[in-house]
Structure formats: structure tokens, C-alpha cells
Amino acid sequence: MAAVPESSLQAGLAALATGDFQDAIAHLEVVCQNQENTLDKLQAQKALLEAYKQNGEKQKAIALCQELCQSTEPQVREWVFSSHPELVASLVGDETGFVAFEQPSGVEEDYRGIEPFVWRYAPRATRWQALKQVNLLPLRLLAVGSAIALFWLIRATLTVFMLLFNDILVKLPYLEPYQPFYSNNTELIFCLLLLLTVFCPWLLDLLLQQFYGLQPLSLIQLSKISPEASRVIQRYCRQHNWRLPQLRILPTTAPLALTYGNLPRTARIVVSQGLLEQLADDEIAAICALELAHIAHGDFVFMSLLLLVRQIVYTVYEQISVWGDRQSQPILYVSAAVASAAYGLWWWLGLPGVWLSQLRVYYSDRFAVNITGNPNGLTRALLKIAVGIAKDTQQKEQTSTLLESLNMFLPTSYYQSITLGSLYPHTDFVPVLAWDCLNPYRFWLTINNTHPLLGDRLQRLERLCQQWHLESELDLLNIPAQTLVSKRQFLLQIAPYLAVLLGLLVSGLFWLIGGISLIVWIPQLAWMFGDWLLIKAFLPIAFSIGTFVRINPLFPDITSKSVRHAPTLAQLSANPAALPINSQPLRLQGKLLGRRGIGNWLGQDLILQSPQGAIALHYQSLLGPIGYIFLRQSLNPQDLLGRHIVINGWFRRGATCWIDVDTLQTQSGKSCRSNHPLWTTILAIAIAVWGAYLLANS
């Protein structure tokens, strides 16, 4: 075999990135002809296919596409279908009789009326005017506030736990409370968090190496896959006199990227194998620029501390779940309770970082575009990550624990990616992303999300394309703005919280009456002035009333007529006027995906993979939250994982799409019922009773 200079592949990729397609073809054809079946050849074939397309050599592109479709590697065939559906479509039914591979039956019917999506590969700026510098003060103030909130949350949680523990010991015979639990733990928590901040880069290295196979990635290795990413990192660090950040790689097929550390010189940029395989050169560079932004803006310091604290707790949940699955009763149930408590604590500790996680993404998007001049490359990268996350979930038939635990720190949220990514390539992204751009109440509905709306981010990138006079990858700025959302529907959506405000006003009015009665001396009413129990009673009562008001709209009757004429999943997702309160009864068939074992006894990872796409399921046990752990039903979702089922439920469209399940039914006719309406009613009654009790004691 003739020796091929290593620079041929690098030169071909570099020429492709700069738009010199003829030069790229010349280099890449040499690599493909002389290399054996190696990773370099596969990378060259992928790049050559793109070069043929961009250079207008359609017949050569189709021929190479056919060769890749016949690969023995399923990941290669999957990549061709997802990245170049228009070429695959041209292979079906050609004169040779070749068919790339079969699509699931019913796909065409399930996507009726929806246009398929085709990548434009819109150009980048060759020369561009630097964007105006943004004020980083809000980001840094929010980072400080988030750090204070994390400290307070840990302190409050630990204090409540210690007091409850001692209260239990007091009530038990022959036992005494543990006196150190009554001491002030403020200084201890502060010192512990300070130490974790100092050592977080090395502790996170250890955690990710031990449990997820984190490995070093040299700049030379990165430059072979993405020369532009290597250049972007080196150029920016050289301009700012930084030591190059250490690179790491996670051996997972899900496309991931994150940054952690406490100083620029201790920073780590982590990418996954899936990201390097599924994204093009300029798209990888755009994601690396995103991660550089977190270092440049300094928000990665607090987020690294938060990642470490949460990852320790999540590792406890994960390891106890794995160990507990091998145990028998009663240890199995004890393990399930501890694992579920650890999962709840992991979720709880993420709350202080939610708003910072949202805001920093807007800053990093702008930063990445400014140093790469490639808003379209970043747009494609974010969409391909969403597609890759959906595929990874479908292939593994569950949400990866790595994906779930790192979600807050990734470029895109896996919650947003589940449905959006699964609709590709049958559905155009623009109609589905219209909700993110047009719904007037969208920002209220993302208040507890870890990431801003993807459509909103991509629309901002499109505005930068306009500013630089570039063709954009999507047309999100040209969506007809005829979104009619009833204000009454939104008020109904927030009825419980609106009722709390009204309850506060009513209790204030009673205080006023009590104050006036005190002045004119009406003792029967004067007691109301200054009585805090009055406010504490009115707030839960008001919340309960607001919950009752919206129960019927949330859970309308599911009839055969309502599900027979229901829109498809793609059409429901593409309604920009939808709110979660607009419940759409729906019946879907598909395969139930999710994590097996006690790690999923809370039902947090349930996904329906249907011919229409994937969607998250919310299921409520007959016996409420405790029913997941100790009081198992004869048939529950855990027993149906991996099986084809029929679900009836209510589709909801908010920042993400999900279905509140009513029933799950197997092909043999067995079914289990979820109990969302029942437990919503029980919750409202319990809160009302609590408020009435407080009122009686006021």
C-alpha cells in the first residue's frame, strides 16, 4: 500500500472548512483510495461526501453515499441516513434495485402534511466585524447570587435533617440525641465548599475517570478530527496569554461537551466520542468556542463546584441502584428508598444553578460566533447534538446516566432534545421551533428549565447572520407571527400561583380590618391584626382553590372520538399557541423505553418511542410517590420496558413536550392506570385541610 502523508487528510479537512471544495476533493480522494478500512478513511469519506455535495458533483456524492450505506458498521449507515437523507432518498428504487435500508412502517403516514428537513449548509463569514462587547456584570452578579443560594440551601437542608434526626432519637427509648447536631454548621459548610472549589478539577477528573471512562485527548488528536477547533483554542489562548486548557474525551456515543475547573490554567474542556463523530469540523470548533466562553466569562467556577457537589450525590444514587438491583427483599426496598432519596437530593441541589445555567448560554453563543464568524455552524451543531441525543436514547433504550447527570452543563438540554431530535429528518425543524420563538408566555414557562429555549437561541443566531449579510441555516425570523394565545388560558395555567397572590391580598385585608378594629376597639376582630398564622393559613387555602379550578381543563375526558381525530406528534409540537393547560387527548403506540431497576422506581425515565417520534411520559402510581418504592402494583411501567404498548393520555406543550399518562396497555390487553387527576385532587384537599387547621388555630 502506498504511503499517504498524514497531512493529506488534514489538508482536505482544512480546504473543506474554508470552502475550497476542489482542493478538498483532491486531497480526500487520495486518502480514500490508499487507506484501508481505518478511522481516517471513514473520516475522509464523510468529508468527501460533503465536498461532492457542495461542489455540485451529485452523481459522485450518490455513489459514495451508496458505498457508505452498504457499510457493515450500523453507526456509519445511521450517520448517512441522518446527515444526508436527500441522498439516501435518491438511492431508493434506482435502476440497480438498491435500497439503502428500510424505514419503519407507517412513517410516511405519521408525518403526513409535514415537510422533511434538509441541511442547507449555509456559509460562514470570511471577514466580519467584531460584535459589540456585552456587559458581563449581570452574569457575574447572578453567579455570586447562585453561590450564596447554594450555600444557604445546603446549610438549610443539613440543619433540617439533623434536627429531624435528633427529634426521632428523642422519641425512641434508651436513645439520646446526638449533641453535635445541635451546633451551628455554617463555618464547616463554608470551609467544605471552599475546599471543593479549590480541588474540583482533580476531584471531577477522578469521578469521571472512575465511573464514566474519561480519557485524555491531546491537541494533536483533536486537530486530526477538527483542525479548526484546534486553531480556535490555540489562537484564543495565545491572544490572552492563557495556558492551553486540558482536553478530555468521554467514550460515549451521545454528543456531549462541558467545561470545568477553577482557573483558566486548570480548566478542562471535555467532549465525547459521539460529538467528534457526528459533527463536522466547523461545528466541533463552534462547540469548543462555546466551552471557551465559559472560561473567559468566569461562570465555569461556580458551575464546576455545583457539578462536583451534584455529581457526588448522583454517583451515590447510581451505585446504590446498581448494587440494590442484585439484592433480595427487604434490602432491595431499603436500597430503593436510599437511591430515590439521593436522586431527589441531586435534583434539589440543582435549583441554585438553574438561572445561571440559562443566562450563561446566551453569553456563550454570542462569544462563540464572535471568535469563529460562523453562526450557521453553531446552529447546525446545536441541532445535530439534539438529534444525536435522541438517537443515543433510542439505541440504548434508556436515558444515559451520564447524559442525565451532566445535563445542566451541556450545550443543549436533553429534555428539549428527546422529541425535537426524534422528529428529524422527517420533519422540518422550523415549525417545531416556532413555539420557542412566538409563544408570548414562553419565558414564564421556562423559569425552572436548565437551558433557554433552543428556538430562541437559534433565532438570535439568525439575527447575527442578518447583521453580517449571511444566508441563514433556518428561517426562524420569517415565521408568520399569527399566534393567538388566550390570556384567559394563561391565567388558568398559573391559577394556583395567582391564587396565592390573591390569598396574600385577602390576608392583608383582614390585617387591615384587624388594625381598624384595634383603633375603634372591636375586640372580636382586633385579634386579626399582626396574626401571622392568618397569612400562613390563607396561602395554602388559596393554592388549593387555584388547583381545583384547573383540574377539569387539565384532564378532560379521553373519548374514542377525541383520540381518533388527534393531530400527529409533529403537528402538536408545531403549534406555537399551545400551553400545557391545552390538554390534547392522545393515543399512541410504540415501544416503552427507560432505565431498568430501582434506579427508575420513581418513574423519572419513561419515554415512548413511536413511529411519530419520541416523547417523555409522566406516570403517577395509584398509591402516589410511595407506591413506586414500597407498594408495587401488580403491573407497572417497569414491567413494560422494552415492550410495545398503547398509551392513552394528555399531550402537553410547554418548553418541552410530554404526555401525562392515563393508561398503559400491552398487546395482550393487560393495562395499568396512572392517577394524575386523583393525586392532583388529593394534593389540593390535603393543602386545604392544612390551611383550615392553621386558620382554626389562629
Image (tube, rainbow, N blue to C red):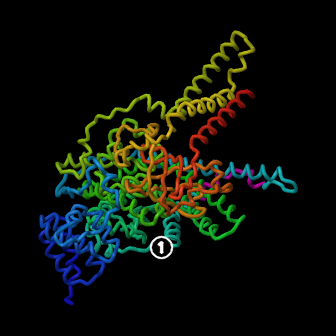
- Residue 260, by quadrant, is bottom left
In the displayed structure, 194 sits above or below 144; it is: below
Q: Callout 1 environment at 10 Å: few (<14), some (14 to 19), or many (20+)?
A: some
Q: Is residue 190 above or below residue 92?
A: above
Q: Which residue is mark 1?
A: 213
Residue 578 belongs to magenta span: no
Q: Kindly identify the residue that appears in the image at 55 percent across and 47 percent down.
A: 149
Magenta part of the chain? 179-192
Assign a secondary structure to mark 1. Answer: loop
For residue 188: magenta?
Answer: yes
On the image, the x and y values in percent for residue 175 come to 84, 56
Left/right placement of residue 240 relative to residue 64 reads right
The residue depicted at 17 percent of the width and 80 percent of the height is 30
Decide: is 71 above or below 442. Answer: below
Please count the marks in the image.
1
Which of the pair 498/18 is nearer the observer? 498
Left or right: 117 as drawn, with respect to 646 = left
Res 210 seen here: yes
Question: Residue 503 appears in which quarter of the rendering?
Answer: top right
Q: Main secondary structure of the magenta part?
A: helix
Q: Quadrant of the C terminus?
A: top right
Q: Position of residue 510 (x, y in %)?
A: 64, 20
Give the residue type that dot 1 points to: Gly
What residue is shown at x 72% (from left), y 20% (from top)?
A: 527
Q: Tell me which residue sits at (49%, 47%) in the image.
A: 648
